[in-house]
Amino acid sequence: MRVRAKTMAVANTAQAAAVPEWVLKFMDAIDTLEFDEGFAPLTEDTDMFFGTAHIHGVEAIKAFFVKIDEPLVIRHEVLEFWTAGDGVRLLRGEATMAKKSEPDRVVRAPFMHIFYLADEDPVRVRELRITAGPLQTDAVM
């Protein structure tokens, strides 16, 4: 019950905001697999939850994205961004992707990122939670 109350408090205080440059750089890093500036907010203490996968530390997170995105031509687009109290940042977007071996077979997948910031100057991500998909809604209905 305590988790639900905290979630409801965040939901009631989230405000739409302009997408910060660090978020755009993070998305670009995932698309290009060039992690320099884009992954600067992540640390060895950052935890990422991608669906059911739990990945700990920036190097393991990089390796995870290489594993899932290297076979793809992918582009992430941020559609909405919100800020909430306690360093919570919410992002909704859409990924357009195709296998490099089948570049004409393009699919789109919605995604949601929840960033829990440890610090904002400079930005440091304590935890990141990502949900993605479904790729084909009719496949799950």
Image (cartoon, grey):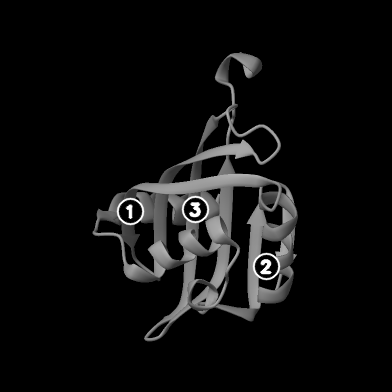
**Three-letter amino acid code of the residue under disc 3:** His
Q: Position of residue 84 (x, y in %)?
A: 33, 61
Q: Position of residue 123 (x, y in %)?
A: 42, 79
Give the vertical position of 34 relative to 119 (above or below).
above
CA separation in Å, label 3 and label 2: 16 Å
**Label 3 with label 2: CB-CB less than 8 Å:** no
Residue topped by disc 2: 62
Number of the front mark, 3 or 2: 2
The residue shown at (71%, 50%) is: 68
Give the vertical position of 125 relative to 6 (above or below).
below
37 left or right of 84 in image:
right
The residue shown at (58%, 41%) is: 132
Give the vertical position of 127 relative to 53 (above or below).
below
Viewer-side residue, 95 vs 12: 95
Going from N to C along the chain, the mark reached first, 1 or 3, is: 1
CA separation in Å, label 1 and label 3: 9 Å
Q: Position of residue 43 (x, y in %)?
A: 61, 80
Residue topped by disc 1: 81
The numbered mark at residue 113 is 3
